[in-house]
Image (cartoon, rainbow, N blue to C red):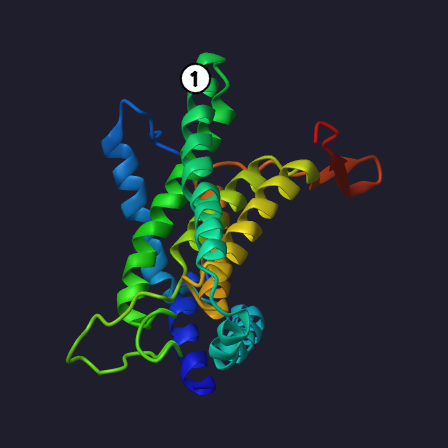
Amino acid sequence: MFLRGFVLLLAALVPLALRAQVRPQEDECEVGAPRVCVRHVLQDEGHILTSPLHARPSDLLWIVPFGLATGVAIDYDAHALRSLGHDPQRENDFRRVSDVGAIYLPIGGVVAGYALGAFRHNDYLKQSAVLSGEAMADSAILNEGLKYAINRETPSQGDGTGRFWPHGTKTWPDGQSMPSGHSITAWSFAHVVADRYPGWHTKLLVYGMATTVSASRIMSRDHFPSDVLVGSMVGYLIGGYVAQKRGEVSKNFTFSMVDTANGRGMQLSYNFNH
C-alpha cells in the first residue's frame, strides 16, 4: 500500500512542478470579456499538464519527501478514521464548516473583491479577485481529472480502507476520494490572496481558513488524511503558479542591482505598507 500510494502521488504531483513564467499581458480577464477568462484557464491547464517537460532535478527535493510523507499517510489512513469513529452530528457540523470555507467564503471574496476594485478603480484589488477565481477554476478542473485517474474509494465505500482501483477497469470509476476537492480549492484561493497581500494578518486569515477546511474534511469523514494532504499541496502549488504567472506579486523584500560610485552593488528594499 505504501509503495503504491507513493507512486500514485508522484504521478499526480510531477505535472505540478510549475515554474512561474511572468510575461506581459495582452488582455485581461474581465466580467465583460468571458472568452479571455476561459482562454486563461485553458492556458493554465495546458501549462500544468505539460509541465513535466520543464521540470528540474531540483524539484525532486520537495516532490520526493512529500511523496514519502503522503505514502506514510496513506498507510495510516484507515487506522486514523477508525480511531476517529462515527458521530453523525459532528460529521454534519464539520461538513458545513468545510463548505463555508471552501465554497461560500472564497466565491464571496472573489465577487466582493472584484466589485469593490471596480467601484474604487483599484486595478490591483480587481486583478487579485480575478486571479483568485482563476486559481479556483484551475483547481476544480484538475481535481476532477485526478479523481478519475487515481480512482480511490472514499471512507464510506467498500471496506473503508480507501482502496485504489479496487476492481480494475471493470467498474471504473469506483471512487473520487483523492484529492480532496474542498482542500484544493481552499488552498489555491488562499495562496493567491497571501501572495498578493503578503502581510502576516492576511496570511494568518487565509491559511488558517484553508487549514480549517482541510481538517474539517477529515472530521466529517468525507476524506482520508492523505486525500486532504494531497489536495492541500496541489491547491497551494496552483495558487502560487497563477499568482506568479498572471500578475505581479507584492513582496515585502526586494533585491535589485544598482550603480554606485564604487561600481555595481545590490540594493535591498522593504515595503512598509504590509
Q: Callout 1: 10 Å neighbours few (<14), some, many (20+)?
A: some
Residue 227: give x, y in percent of width and height: 44, 66
- The residue furthest left is 170
Q: Residue at x 68, y 37 (%)?
A: 201
- What's the residue type where badge 1 is placed? Ala
Q: Residue at x 41, y 42 (%)?
A: 103
Q: Residue at x 15, y 80 (%)?
A: 170
Task: Locate residue 61 relative to residue 237 in the image: left or right.
Answer: right
Q: Residue at x 36, y 57 (%)?
A: 48
Residue 72, relative to residue 177: is it above or below?
A: below
Residue 216: give x, y in percent of width and height: 51, 55
Q: Which residue is mark 1?
A: 118
Q: Quadrant of the N terminus?
A: bottom left
Q: Quadrant of the C terminus?
A: top right
Residue 109, relative to residue 39: is it above or below?
A: above
| Circle 1 SS class | helix
| Along the line of sight, the residue nearer the viewer: 43 or 161 | 161
Residue 99: give x, y in percent of width and height: 42, 45
Q: Quadrant of residue 55?
A: bottom left
Residue 197: give x, y in percent of width and height: 60, 35
Q: Is residue 260 visible?
A: yes
| Along the line of sight, the residue nearer the viewer: 107 or 81 | 81
Task: Locate residue 272 relative to residue 165 in the image: left or right.
Answer: right
Q: Is residue 241 visible?
A: no
Q: How many marks?
A: 1
